[in-house]
Image (cartoon, grey):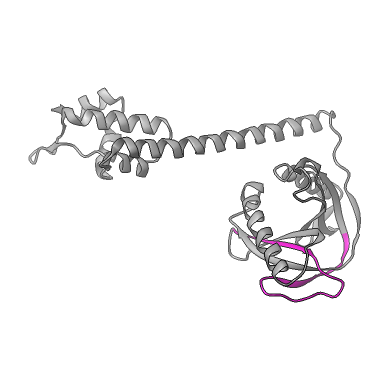
């Protein structure tokens, strides 16, 4: 048997952490002296401690570690946790690479190597669309992008079921959900000259915009956030403020083109401060 101090030293963890693992039921001691309250650990528990430390070093959560240590088939449980953790790390690396690219682009702009995209101010006419709505858990491409494809699939299916064909350009717009961190995501296609109601989509009249800040984004969806940031920066620099929901109008897009060939107008209604 090991004292808690000896056991902590072998596992290279603190006594405080061993007490925490005991409190949450992941690694309770083999014996506790009723009189002194001292904790003692058995030789057989060393494997559990080393496995726990290994998984913590790999960034696995305590719930996952507890599931491994309590599993009847630990090898299978360990493999499942590691496969899931590997996927999480791959996603994190991809996100970090995207952040690095955005940092490099911003540095090039600050150094004058890359000109800022041109923002123009002009009116936007009213348009009628066939639309569906969904929710994203927050702002930013990492939250919005996963919500888009299911909405497009839902909308094209509903339009097809009504005997219609999706008409370009597609128009997306976004609105904050009151008293929530969620974002309402609206996906639409241009309606027929004589709009036809149908089940599964709404006929929506998007109002005209007296003055809109408009920037043309050329490229894929993961990079669109940088263009939105450039637009917002320019709007602020020019003394305007955003006055309503922003829109994305997909002038050249679709499965027949690779996303780096897409052309999208970013539109924000604005007014002078």
| Residue 3: image location, x then y, percent | 16, 28
- Assess whether residue 105 is covered by the magenta stretch: no
Is 179 rendered above or below residue 73? below
Is 16 rendered above or below residue 67? above
| Residue 253: image location, x then y, percent | 79, 50
Question: In terms of image quadrants, where is residue 164?
Answer: bottom right
Residue at horizontal 21 percent and vertical 39 percent from the top: 28
- Assess whether residue 210 is covered by the magenta stretch: yes
Magenta segment boundaries in residue numbering: 182-211
| Residue 13: image location, x then y, percent | 31, 28
In this picture, residue 30 sits left or right of residue 158: left
Residue at horizontal 90 percent and vertical 54 percent from the top: 121
Is 140 rendered above or below residue 186? above
Residue at horizontal 61 percent and vertical 54 percent from the top: 138
In this picture, residue 44 sits left or right of residue 205: left
Question: In terms of image quadrants, where is residue 57?
Answer: top left
Residue farthest to the left, as pictured: 35
Residue at horizontal 36 percent and vertical 29 percent from the top: 54
Question: In terms of image quadrants, where is residue 170?
Answer: bottom right
Can you say which quadrant of the picture contains the N terminus?
Answer: top left
- Number of numbered discs on residues: 0
Can you say which quadrant of the picture contains the C terminus?
Answer: bottom right
């Amino acid at each position: 048997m090991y004292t808690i101090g000896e056991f902590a030293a072998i596992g290279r963890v603190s006594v405080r952490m061993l007490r925490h693992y005991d409190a949450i039921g992941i690694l309770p001691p083999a014996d506790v002296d009723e009189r002194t309250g001292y904790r003692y650990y058995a030789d057989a528990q060393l494997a559990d401690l080393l496995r726990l430390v290994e998984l913590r070093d790999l960034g696995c959560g305590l719930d996952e570690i507890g599931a491994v240590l309590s599993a009847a088939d630990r090898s299978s449980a360990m493999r499942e946790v590691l496969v899931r953790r590997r996927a999480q790390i791959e996603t994190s690396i991809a996100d970090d690479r995207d952040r690095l690219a955005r940092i490099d682009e911003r540095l090039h702009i600050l150094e004058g190597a890359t000109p800022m995209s041109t923002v123009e101010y002009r009116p936007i006419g009213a348009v009628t669309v066939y639309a569906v709505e969904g929710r994203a858990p927050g702002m930013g491409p990492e939250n919005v992008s996963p919500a888009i494809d299911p909405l497009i699939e839902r909308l094209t299916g509903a339009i097809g079921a009504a005997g219609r064909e999706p008409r370009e350009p597609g128009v997306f717009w976004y609105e904050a959900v009151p008293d929530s961190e969620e974002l309402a995501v609206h996906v639409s296609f241009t309606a027929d000259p004589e709009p036809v109601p149908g089940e599964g989509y709404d006929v929506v009249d998007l109002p005209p915009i007296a003055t809109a800040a408009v920037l043309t984004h050329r490229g894929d969806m993961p990079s669109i956030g940088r263009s939105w940031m450039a637009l917002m920066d320019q709007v602020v620099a020019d003394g305007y403020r955003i006055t309503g929901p922003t829109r994305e109008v997909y002038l050249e897009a679709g499965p027949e083109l690779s996303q780096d060939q897409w052309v999208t107008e970013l539109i924000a209604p604005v007014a002078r401060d």
